[in-house]
Structure formats: C-alpha cells, structure tokens
C-alpha cells in the first residue's frame, strides 16, 4: 500500500513505520498528505458578527451578562462578537472603563491563537 499523494510505502495505522515508510492515516493517504489535503484555515473564534450591534444594547447586554460571569471571553461569546468588538462598542458608547477587560481578553486570545 502506498500513499496516493506522495507514493511512499505505507503501513497501517498504529503500526510502527519502518525506515522509508509512512503510516496510513485515511483515504489512502499518509498522515502528512491527509492533513495537507484536509487542512482548512481555522475560522476566527469567536466569529465576527454580520452586523455591529447597537452600542447602547451592547452596554445593556454586558451589564446583564456580568451579573452571571466576569469572564470577558464568555461575555463576548454570548454576544456573538469578539472581545475586541465588545471593547470597541463600549468605547464608542462612552464607556472605555468597561472596555478594558475585553481588550485584555483579546490580547490573551491573540497570544494563544
Ligand atoms: Zn503521502
């Protein structure tokens, strides 16, 4: 059995691949080719909103959600927008004091992305 893509000899999954062999991964492809074939760029998380929510409603929602959680990532996810989106909406709505934890959450997300 050889890989459809790169033609290298393959051994079944969970077998130790001898020198010059690769392990079968799926669909007749070795793990490297399979991952290359099925690779899709990770979607941004959380998803970017289609429309920007109204600013005053963001403040209301953040207030409501903060009664339940202090985690800005959870709040942003519940609103369906990124932490940066929440922060920007709060800043534009004249509440930059509320925006700070969301900027920090966004930086955290970027660092771990
Ligand atoms: Zn291959």
Image: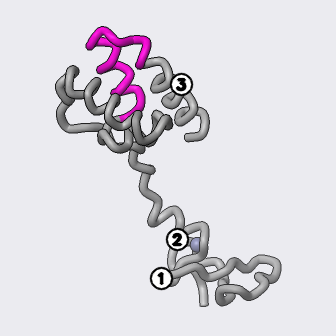
Place of residue 47 in the rendered image (x, y in percent of width and height, measured from the top left): 33, 43
| 55 in relation to 112, above or below | above
Query: Of helix, strand and loop, which mostly describes the magenta segment?
Result: helix
Q: Which mark is residue 27?
A: 1
Do the numbered discs 3 and 2 sit on residues whose CB atoms are within 8 Å? no
Mark toward the viewer: 1 or 3:
3
Span of residues in magenta: 82-98
Place of residue 46 in the rendered image (x, y in percent of width and height, measured from the top left): 39, 43
| 111 in relation to 97, above or below | below
Q: CA distance from mark 1 to mark 3?
A: 43 Å
- Secondary structure of residue under mark 2: helix
Q: Which residue is mark 3?
A: 104
Q: Quadrant of the C terminus?
A: top right
- Quarter of the picture for ligand 1? bottom right
Looking at the image, residue 84 sits to the left or right of residue 80; the answer is: right
Q: Which residue is mark 2?
A: 34
């Amino acid at each position: 059995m050889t890989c459809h893509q790169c033609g290298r000899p393959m051994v079944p999954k969970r077998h130790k691949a001898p020198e010059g062999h690769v392990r079968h991964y799926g669909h007749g492809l070795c793990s490297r080719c399979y991952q290359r074939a099925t690779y899709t760029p990770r979607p941004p998380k959380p998803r970017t909103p289609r429309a920007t929510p109204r600013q005053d409603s963001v403040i209301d929602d953040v207030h409501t959600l903060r009664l339940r959680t202090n985690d800005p990532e959870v709040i942003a996810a519940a609103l369906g927008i990124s932490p940066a989106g929440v922060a920007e909406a709060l800043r534009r709505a004249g509440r930059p004091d509320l925006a700070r934890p969301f900027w920090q959450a966004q930086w955290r997300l970027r660092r771990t992305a």
